[in-house]
């Protein structure tokens, strides 16, 4: 249905109309001629002023240029107002639809992020616990190897090496990227997660004190934008007074 409908611009402005540039050129041909003539007159003035009379000539043309520029700009506003109003209506309609969809998606992604965050924590804890248990067993095997001789010592040392390898795998899992820990595909949809750095301003006065004499003149929005830019560059390696830097987990759904 959407593919066969007539675009809104054609419905509002009509079919088979001349291009806007062509219509403007015809409707305001006289205005364009006046502007061209005045610009040409300005170009013929000398490159330097030697007398008050020449200064007067400059002032006369400058006044005309200013007046005609004001007329041109006023005409632009008058002609463009219906188009601007139409654009605002169009943007308002679609932005409202998009905002509703984005809000619904954001709510669902928030719930999914909570699940992925808990899943990540559980997997890291499980891997870390398994690694600790294996390391304890490795230590016991190495202690037995140290206390034994011959075949018994060799077997204990070999067992310790195997336990160490298994522990390393679990330690790697505990330190793996978030996406590698929680990625899953269900019903044709891949749900994963990524680590994101965010922040919270706990003491704005302490933060502002680091900005020097210009601090009071920065808006809070500008300060937050600067912190976000800094975090994009340095990730978690950011230390700012009064600001808590937080690594969070956010679900990704494709």
Image (cartoon, rainbow, N blue to C red):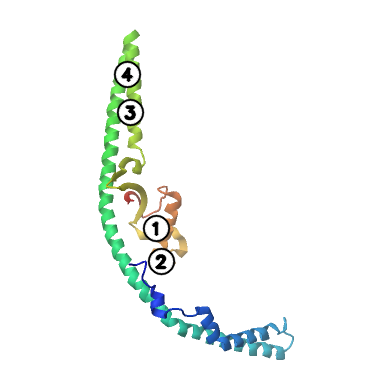
Which one is earlier in the sequence, the residue at label 4 or at label 1?
4
Q: In whole angstroms, how far apart are the C-alphas of marks 3 and 2?
A: 51 Å
Q: In whole angstroms, how far apart are the C-alphas of marks 4 and 2?
A: 63 Å
- Of circles 4 and 2, the one toward us is 4
Q: In whole angstroms, how far apart are the C-alphas of marks 3 and 1?
A: 43 Å
Label 4, secondary structure: give it. Answer: helix
Please, which residue is most extreme toward the right here? 50
Is the residue under label 2 in contact with that under label 1 (CB below 8 Å)? no
Residue on which disc 1 sits: 207
Q: Tell me which residue sits at (27%, 60%) in the image.
A: 104
Which one is earlier in the sequence, the residue at label 4 or at label 2?
4
Q: In whole angstroms, how far apart are the C-alphas of marks 4 and 3?
A: 12 Å
Q: Residues within 10 Å of mark 2 (few under 14, many from 20)?
A: few
Residue 3: give its label.
none
Q: Is residue 223 left or right of residue 189?
A: right
Is the residue under label 1 in contact with that under label 3 (CB below 8 Å)? no
Label 1, secondary structure: give it. Answer: helix
Residue on which disc 3 sits: 167
Residue on which disc 2 sits: 219
Q: Quadrant of the N terminus?
A: bottom left
Q: Is residue 14 left or right of residue 64?
A: left
* Residue 192 shows in the view: yes
Which one is earlier in the sequence, the residue at label 1 or at label 2?
1
Q: Eyeballing the image, is 46 above or below 212?
A: below
């Amino acid at each position: 249905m959407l593919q066969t409908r007539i675009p809104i611009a054609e419905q509002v402005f009509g079919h088979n109309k001349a291009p806007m540039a062509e219509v403007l050129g015809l409707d305001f041909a006289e205005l364009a001629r006046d502007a061209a003539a005045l610009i040409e007159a300005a170009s013929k003035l000398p490159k330097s002023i030697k007398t008050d009379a020449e200064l007067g000539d400059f002032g006369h043309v400058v006044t005309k240029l200013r007046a005609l520029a004001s007329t041109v700009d006023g005409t632009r506003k008058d002609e463009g107002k219906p188009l601007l109003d139409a654009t605002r209506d169009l943007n308002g309609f679609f932005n409202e639809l998009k905002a509703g969809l984005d809000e619904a998606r954001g709510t669902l992604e928030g719930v999914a992020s909570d699940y992925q965050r808990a899943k990540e924590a559980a997997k890291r804890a499980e891997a870390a616990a398994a690694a600790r248990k294996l390391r304890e067993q490795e230590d016991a095997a190495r202690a037995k190897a140290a206390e034994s001789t011959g075949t018994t010592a060799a077997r204990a040392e070999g067992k310790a090496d195997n336990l160490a390898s298994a522990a390393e795998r679990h330690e790697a899992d505990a330190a793996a990227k978030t996406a590698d820990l929680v990625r899953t595909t269900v019903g044709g949809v891949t749900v994963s997660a990524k680590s994101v750095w965010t922040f919270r301003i706990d003491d704005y006065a302490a933060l502002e004190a680091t900005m020097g004499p210009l601090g009071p003149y920065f808006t809070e929005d500008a300060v937050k934008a600067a912190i976000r830019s800094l975090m994009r560059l340095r990730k978690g390696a950011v230390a700012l007074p009064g600001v808590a830097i937080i690594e969070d987990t956010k679900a990704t759904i494709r």
